Amino acid sequence: MDVDSDSDISIFDDDNENSRNKTKGKGKTTDKRKKDKGKRKPKDQAYTWEANYTRSWETVQEDEAGSLQGAVEDWIARGRRKRHAHCFQSKNSAPSTAIRRTIIRHLVLIIDLSSSMMDRDMRPTRFGLTLQYAREFILEWFDQNPLGQMGVVGMRAGVGERVAEMSGNPQDVLKALSDRHKLEPTGDPSLQNAIEMARNSMNHLPTHSAREILIIFGSLTTCDPGNIHDTLAECIKNRIQISVVALAAEMKICRELCDKTGGQFGVALNEGHYKDLLFELVPPPAQRTVSRATGPGAPNPAADLMMMGFPTRLPDSSPPSLCVCHSDLRSDGFLCPRCLSKVCDVPTDCDVCGLMIVSSPHLARSYHHLFPVKPYVAITTFDNQSSQPDQQACHACARPFPTTVAQSTAEGMSPIGRYRCPECQQDFCSDCDVYIQNHLHCCPGCGK
């Protein structure tokens, strides 16, 4: 019987039927695997860079001249606004009670220099990325905390190594991190030895200053010579706040160090999250409640008033003399107002009389954490809606405001190009807005 190949009826024997059943089963299995594979494909992301660079080329928009510089500047401006909004929300959220912040900070940065920092789960390595972010963190920290001082401690080969002494000059700290070969990771870390070294370097500090330890930890083990809980008890007694940024996973002892001392703990998910965790620690932390006893002779650990001195700056043309901090022969420097000793940089503590020496601009800039500027209102259109009809440029930097979206992108400004002070109704560009909110405690237009 002839059977048409296009017919739905087919005549086959038992062998053909068995082979057909096998083929049919394979087809179902293959289809099922294809469906499962298609379902799992968008969900599985084995690498952290897949989330950052997924079809990122579609978001790039060229300007009228065919340049990508405007898009790059726009991304930078948006990232700056995002970080500023996060910090501003954390600092200026309306609490139920007044928040007291310590503007005189002493921070010890502990960096893990063990062999685990050579892992490549973060580009190029954990060690390379940590050095890059540490430099950026140091600059931003000193920029927003001009009265603070910082030291650096490394932990490798089971011991703690002092990388940089406690200093108020960011260039001294950056110089200690510039030599990469001296910081080459090796061995295992020791949390106890590093914390003990940082704690001993802050024993002489006054009670009114904030004592903080920031640990960048990339290992899952720690090689300690004793009981680390005894070290934790001493840190609690000395009011030292410990914060940890973990690069591998959460460890119970790291969580206890942060919870019992009032610090912050976080595990970096990727490069961007790693940087966000670091820069969250740039603003000064809220001061913990201190019990005040009443009556004559009652101890009061909280200092309401502290003595500071404003030094006299020596010009470069002055005769060379020895400084009391490094015993170096140099012309420029600062004279202590109490004992007339010469120091290299400020802010610092005089090595002769112990007076804290600061400059008046540093003190004024530190007030922006205590008395922040009111948030400016974003202008969502490019029409001139200002109360000043002739204002076509930023009130601070005199940069002309863009009039169209294309011009805004070409000039490297955010599409929302202006921000208005709610008091004086003056408009500022996005760059000046971020600078005013992060560095000043009053509006340059109205002084409020």
Image (cartoon, grey):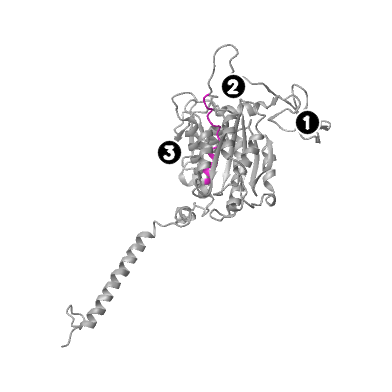
Position of residue 201 measured from the top left corner of the image (x, y, whole percent): 67, 34
Q: Are marks 1 and 3 in contact (CB under 8 Å)?
A: no
Work out which quarter of the rendered image holds the N terminus and state it.
bottom left
Q: CA distance from mark 1 to mark 3?
A: 57 Å
Residue found at the very far front of the displayed protein: 226
Q: Label 1: which residue? A: 324
Could you tell me which residue is drawn at 67 percent across and 40 percent down? 173
Depth-wise, is mark 1 or mark 3 nearer the camera? 1
Residue range (magenta): 274-289
Q: Does the magenta-highlighted stretch encompass residue 439?
A: no
Q: Using the image, determine if residue 355 lies above or below residue 77.
A: above
Residue type, label 2: Pro
* 269, 140: nearer the viewer: 269
Residue found at the very far top of the displayed protein: 296
Q: Are marks 2 and 1 in contact (CB under 8 Å)?
A: no
Question: Visible in this render: residue 124?
Answer: no
Is the stretch drawn in magenta largely helix, strand or loop? loop
Q: Label 3: which residue? A: 381
Position of residue 158 measured from the top left corner of the image (x, y, whole percent): 64, 47
Position of residue 71 measured from the top left corner of the image (x, y, whole percent): 50, 49
Q: Of label 3 and label 2, which has the lower sequence position? A: 2
Q: Using the image, determine if residue 312 lies above or below residue 415.
A: above
Q: Secondary structure at mark 1?
A: loop
Depth-wise, is mark 2 or mark 1 nearer the camera? 2
Say the numbered circle drawn on residue 301: 2
Position of residue 162 measured from the top left corner of the image (x, y, whole percent): 68, 42
Q: Secondary structure at mark 2?
A: loop
Residue type, label 3: Thr
Residue found at the very far bottom of the displayed protein: 1
Residue type, label 1: Val
